[in-house]
């Protein structure tokens, strides 16, 4: 098996750290070159209950963009995985509006952030969800 692309591994690490800090969903990451598009690198998130989700990045593109994009790609699958595990499928939950809507991954102020879709307020930088704010 080929080693996972370093750029992809780095971006997935950021997004999955949010997932693993805030849920019990811990997907297996598979190196899956499912994309035939040049410059695109693929991987797959996999769990027996939820099945697999293809994730991709464009190699060499802006990292902020890659992180927001992978968070967006992962989000649908996470919702499915949570639902199948009998958990609230709202992820990441908006702290301002609990049980209402998930936060949305967007690029804002040159950072990949989780943003409330109603107030448009940035709640956390992607990769820092569930961490205590540093003093
Ligand atoms: Zn909200």
Image: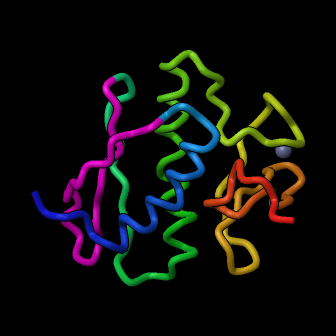
Identity of the residue furthest to the top in this view: 86
Which residue does the image show at 13% across and 63% down from the upper left? 2
**What quarter of the picture does the C terminus occupy?**
bottom right
* Residue 78 falls inside the magenta stretch: no
Query: Considering only vertical position in the picture, is 11 above or below 47?
Result: below
Which residue does the image show at 67% across and 32% down from the upper left? 90
Q: What is the magenta range?
A: 26-48
The spot of residue 56 in percent (x, y) is 36, 61
Which residue does the image show at 78% across and 53% down from the upper left? 132
The spot of residue 20 in percent (x, y) is 54, 43
* Residue 29 falls inside the magenta stretch: yes
Identity of the residue furthest to the front in this view: 135
- Looking at the image, residue 16 sits to the left or right of residue 21; the answer is left
On the rendering, which quadrant does ligand 1 occupy?
Answer: top right
Identity of the residue furthest to the left in this view: 1
The spot of residue 25 in percent (x, y) is 49, 34
The foreground one among 20 and 117 is 20
- Looking at the image, residue 25 sits to the left or right of residue 106; the answer is left
The foreground one among 86 and 80 is 86
Which residue does the image show at 29% across and 55% down from the upper left? 43
- Looking at the image, residue 99 sits to the left or right of residue 13; the answer is right
Query: Considering only vertical position in the picture, is 35 above or below 79?
Result: below
The foreground one among 127 and 65 is 127
The spot of residue 52 in percent (x, y) is 32, 37
């Amino acid at each position: 098996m080929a080693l996972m692309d370093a750029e992809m591994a780095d971006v997935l690490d950021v997004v999955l750290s949010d997932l693993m800090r805030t849920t019990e969903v811990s997907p297996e990451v598979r190196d899956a070159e499912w994309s035939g598009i040049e410059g695109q690198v693929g991987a797959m998130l996999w769990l027996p209950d939820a099945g697999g989700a293809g994730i991709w990045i464009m190699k060499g593109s802006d990292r902020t963009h890659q992180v927001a994009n992978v968070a967006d790609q992962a989000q649908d699958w996470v919702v499915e995985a949570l639902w199948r595990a009998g958990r609230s499928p709202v992820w990441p939950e908006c702290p301002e509006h609990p049980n209402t809507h998930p936060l949305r991954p967007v690029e804002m102020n040159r950072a990949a952030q989780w943003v409330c879709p109603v107030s448009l307020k940035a709640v956390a930088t992607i990769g820092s969800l569930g961490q205590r704010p540093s003093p």
